[in-house]
Image (cartoon, helix red, strand yellow):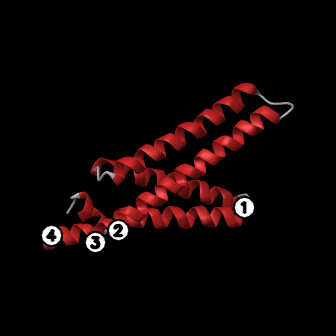
Amino acid sequence: MTGEKSVASGASTLDWGVRLLYLQSAGLAVLTAYLIVLDLTSGEVNVAVAASLTVMAALAAFAVFAVARALGRRRVRARGPAVVVQLFLLATGGFLLQIGSVAVGVSMLVLAIVTAVLILVPPSSRALGVD
């Protein structure tokens, strides 16, 4: 019984990491919807560039959702891709800081760091069966 309790308590950090991954996926889905609206309402637009950017955002939303779902199902192999997603988010946040979007950039950096820490802390590793 004590082994089950330690796994259940360790699962809370992993569960919060998974929730934040779902939040990131939802944010990408909102971005995709926004890009679709821009594609349809903009006067002069390079259709190939607009369509490819929109498709890339949609694929990213799906990929992050799939990683979150796999990690939520305690698939240890999903932890690596989840950390890679956070590295991309860190790069994006850093870029936004450089171009002057300080509030959004700092928010993305904090979200990426918190999510990565929650996924990598020892209780999450135990919940995944990695010791």
CA–CA distance in space, label 1 to label 2? 32 Å
Q: Which residue is mark 4?
A: 3
> In this rendering, is residue 44 above or below 20?
above
Tell which circle, 1 or 3, labels the residue nearer the N-terminal end. Answer: 3
Tell which circle, 2 or 4, labels the residue nearer the N-terminal end. Answer: 4
CA–CA distance in space, label 1 to label 3? 38 Å
Q: Which residue is mark 2?
A: 12
Tag nearer the camera, 1 or 2: 2
Q: Splitting the image into 4 quarters, where does residue 6 fall?
A: bottom left
Please identify the residue farthest to the left as the structure is shown.
1
Tag nearer the camera, 1 or 3: 3
Assign a secondary structure to mark 3: helix
Q: Residue at x 65, y 46 (%)?
A: 31
Mark 4: give few (<14), some (14-19) or many (20+) Cα within 10 Å. Answer: few
Q: Splitting the image into 4 quarters, where does residue 11 fall?
A: bottom left
> In this rendering, is residue 3 above or below 108?
below
Callout 2 amino acid: Ser
Tell which circle, 1 or 4, labels the residue nearer the N-terminal end. Answer: 4
Tell which circle, 4 or 3, labels the residue nearer the N-terminal end. Answer: 4
CA–CA distance in space, label 2 to label 3? 6 Å
Callout 1 amino acid: Ser
Assign a secondary structure to mark 2: helix
Please identify the residue farthest to the front as the structure is shown.
1
Q: Residue at x 53, y 49 (%)?
A: 25
Mark 1: give few (<14), some (14-19) or many (20+) Cα within 10 Å. Answer: few
